[in-house]
Image: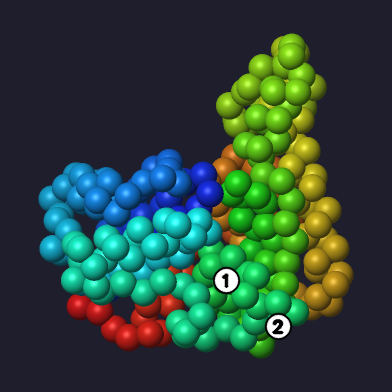
Amino acid sequence: MLLAIDVGNTQTHLGMFRGDELVEHWRFATVRGATADELATVVANLLSLRDLRLRDVDGAVVSAVVPQLAREWEQVSVRYLDGALAVVGPGLKTGMPIRTEIPQELGADRLVNAVAAYARAGSACVVVDFGTAITYDAVSANGEYLGGIISPGVEISIEALSERAAKLPKVDIAPPAELIGRTTQASIQSGIVYGFAGQVDGIVCRLREELGEDVTVIATGGVAGAIAPFCAEIDEIDELLTLTGLRLIWERNGSYA
């Protein structure tokens, strides 16, 4: 079985695959100071919920935007997984040419998303990832990573609003009952949901014009389910896209049992 590990700035997403079937997945808060032993304990406890053990893991693949945690996950592999781990980065085959000026700047998670989206769409596509930041990644019809756009994420904006405006509370991300809020909380929720939906639609429309061809737009990320349904330009929502991309990259670098 394959353990796919997506280490984000805010959350870490784990997925356990048997072949191409996702058996289970979990999210937990990313703790930048976590040690390999602490990470292994978290994984072991989560696996036990499905009557699985670390010894059931035949291989693991990780993408990490937090460099120190990439090193800790490598130690998890050495100490608990017999070293059977691949880290997305230079030297690992992805099957996707990167056509940016400085390829090494590209975040591993964004490349993984692009790989999964192109495999799914089979043509030009854009991934909108609702994470700590909202990222937009464009892939050509020939399967080349072209570049992207980065803007502040939903949760960052909510936190900044509550911190900088004394009378405005921090609210949960939830679909507004109506456009015009009748309480302060409802007004903020409406502004967050419709504001970000408008941003996404505006940027995606410009990307469609820039790419000049039929484009499939796929949304993913922790809060995609809250914002993407209000976006007219989103074609599909797949909150498991990154895990799928990790599995595909693992397969392109060798098979597993």
Relative to 98, is 36 above or below? Answer: above
Picture residue at 45% right of the left edge, 46% below the top: 32
Is there any visible trace of residue 6 in the rendered image?
Answer: no
Q: Are marks 2 and 1 in contact (CB under 8 Å)?
A: no
Of callouts 2 and 1, which one flags the residue occurring earlier in the amino acid sequence?
2
Name the residue that disc number 1 marks. 111
Provide the secondary structure element on which disc 1 rests. Answer: helix
Say how many tags the image has.
2
Does the image show residue 73?
A: yes
Q: Residue at x 51, y 80 (%)?
A: 90
Could you say which disc has been placed on residue 119 in the image? none
Q: Residue visible at 80% across and 45% down?
A: 198
Left or right: where 182 falls relative to 1 = right
Image coords of residue 187 (percent x, y): 75, 21
Q: Which residue is mark 2?
A: 99
- Which secondary structure, mark 2? loop
Residue 68 % position (x, y):
45, 57
Q: Return the x and y of residue 25 as percentages of the image width and height.
A: 34, 52
* Left or right placement of residue 52 versus residue 35 in this view: left
Task: Specify the amino acid type for callout 1.
Answer: Leu
